[in-house]
Image (spheres, grey):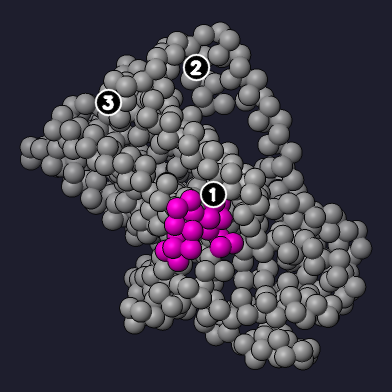
Amino acid sequence: MFILTTLIEKKHIIILPKRFLAVVLTLFCIQLWLYASGQLLSTSSWALQTVLYASAALLFVLGASVPTSSLRRWIHLYLLVACLWSSVGLFVWLGGTNGKALEFGPITSVLAPAIKLAGPFNQGNIFAGLVGFALIFSHWLAWKEQKIRYAIAVAFFTAMLFDTLSRGEWLAYLFIAACLLFALKPNAREAMRCFIIPWLCGLSAGFILAHFSQPSLIGSDGISGLVNSAGATMEARLTIWATALSIFLHTPLVGSGWGQYAPQSWLAAPAASDLMARFGLSHHLVSNYASGHNIILHLMAEGGILVLLPLCWGLWYLIKTSCRLLARPHNIRITFSLAAISFIIQSQVNITFTKPLPLLLTVFFIGIAMAPTLRRKSWKLPVSAPMISATAAATAAFIFWATPTVIQWFQAERALYAFDLDDQASAKTLAGFATIPRIGAIPSIWLGYKVATTNSHTGLLKWLTPPLRNAVHDIPMVAGYQVLFYTLGSTDALQEACRVGQLIKAQHFVNERNNQIYQDICDGKPFEQYHFGTN
């Protein structure tokens, strides 16, 4: 819809970079081969990532095609949306919904307040990246235009970024702020007006807002907890990075396939443990993780060397472009270049790159930043009425295909919250979602968990076994594997239960209490009691 709106609004030339298109087509052909060869653990995850990466490729091309005269308007539009986005997040975070999620019909638009400030459809770390983009744009406009409204925007987005408590984005922003100061070389008056005073006001406002948030960040679980957890989170990241590297080493050329990191991470745990042992490190997890927490390692795991090489090539070109733009600070493209660099820095330590919105925005910004270079070796395609019509038809088809699935997801969420095992209608409603690919993962896990922990309606366990086998690949999580093990062990499928139990054991979860049970199952002994969770 974004692409279609842009084409209709202003007819211009579409830039089709030759090298980029060749690389993209090659990578898509490789992924189609992986899909056709049956090597993927989760085809639903692969399909979602394929749609996401195809959208990213289109937005990169669109970014390269945006005329320079429109760039300032794009920045203003982003700042407006970011202000609205932040205001909605603040409303929920400050208690506007009485500690509950913000809902519109079947759709949960903002999660219930947590320690970190978050915006609609995102958690704190993701929201931080989006706010970081707005902060970079505001800085450049404050320096360029010398208008008070942009200095106020700097203060506002500084407060928002502070309250997200995202250490990764703080690090990225500090680096980008240093680059901006180096490039802009503001005099003392400009530095005070555009940087120092807005920063101090923003930090003060952020601290005050944090005090009145729900929950307050002043408590032991707030900022002090964030500082104290730094060592633990780094240990977890080392384990995650070792897992990503182990997946890559298993299939180094083509990788495991798009969207396959999460299911493959369970299988790669023994290799990751051996890899960490070589460096004197212990392999321990508090929970499982759905991404590599590092964009390069994650893409290496899913795409292999054939993705790593063009990725490094693209990063090198982006860095070269950014260095050239730093020498020309009046060029508006410097803001888009630095925004993309901030995303890449943040993506070295967290999950922001796995979320569609920041990823799609970033590739759009990269296309804008690199446009002058890309146009030298590209095909020029004039926007015509047939092209707009074809885009409109493709958009309509996509919406027609995607909308029922999205609505089903939120309907399943509602059924999950209203579920009562002893209420036949409620149980039947939730069970109706259990067999739907991907959407049925959490309903089937929750249904099996309630049966297991209440020891009632145990006849459902055999029926739940096939959906649970798919669930642990579509949305791999500790509870899913534990419920699958319990279900298999309770229905006398001891051989498969043994394999699942050994897989859980290999994750080395902290405070795991079922290791002896997993061994007993392999020895043919049924279990009498099973402990769910990892605490």
Give the magenta range: 245-264
Task: Tell whether 137 sits left or right of 85.
Answer: left
Q: Is mark 3 on a helix, strand or loop?
A: helix
Location of residue 24 in the rendering, given as x and y in whole percent from the top left corner: 46, 35
Location of residue 272 in the rendering, given as x and y in whole percent from the top left corner: 45, 72
Q: Is residue 290 magenta?
A: no
Q: Residue at x 35, y 79 (%)?
A: 278
Q: Earlier in the sequence, mark 2 or mark 3?
A: 2
Task: Tell whether 218 sits left or right of 326.
Answer: right
Q: How far apart are marks 2 and 1 (CA)?
A: 29 Å
Q: Which residue is drawn at 45% across and 60% down?
A: 248
Location of residue 170 in the rendering, given as x and y in whole percent from the top left corner: 31, 55
The answer to whether residue 213 is above or below residue 52 is below
Q: Which amino acid does label 1 sit on?
A: Trp
The answer to whether residue 426 is above or below residue 327 is below
Q: Earlier in the sequence, mark 3 or mark 1?
A: 1
Q: Which amino acid does label 3 sit on?
A: Thr
Q: Distance between the residues labelled 2 and 3?
A: 22 Å
Residue annotated with mark 1: 258
Q: Residue at x 43, y 17 (%)?
A: 14
Between marks 2 and 1 in the image, the one whose residue lies nearer the viewer: 1
Q: Which of marks 2 and 1 is nearer the N terminus?
A: 2
Q: Which amino acid does label 2 sit on?
A: Leu
The answer to whether residue 138 is above or below residue 492 is above
Q: How far apart are marks 3 and 1 (CA)?
A: 29 Å
- Mark 3 burial class by Cα count in 10 Å: few <14, some 14-19, many 20+: some
Placement of the C terminus among the 4 image quadrants: bottom right
Residue annotated with mark 3: 373
Residue 7 numbered mark, or none: 2
Q: What element carries label 1?
A: loop
In this rendering, does residue 353 appear at all? Answer: yes
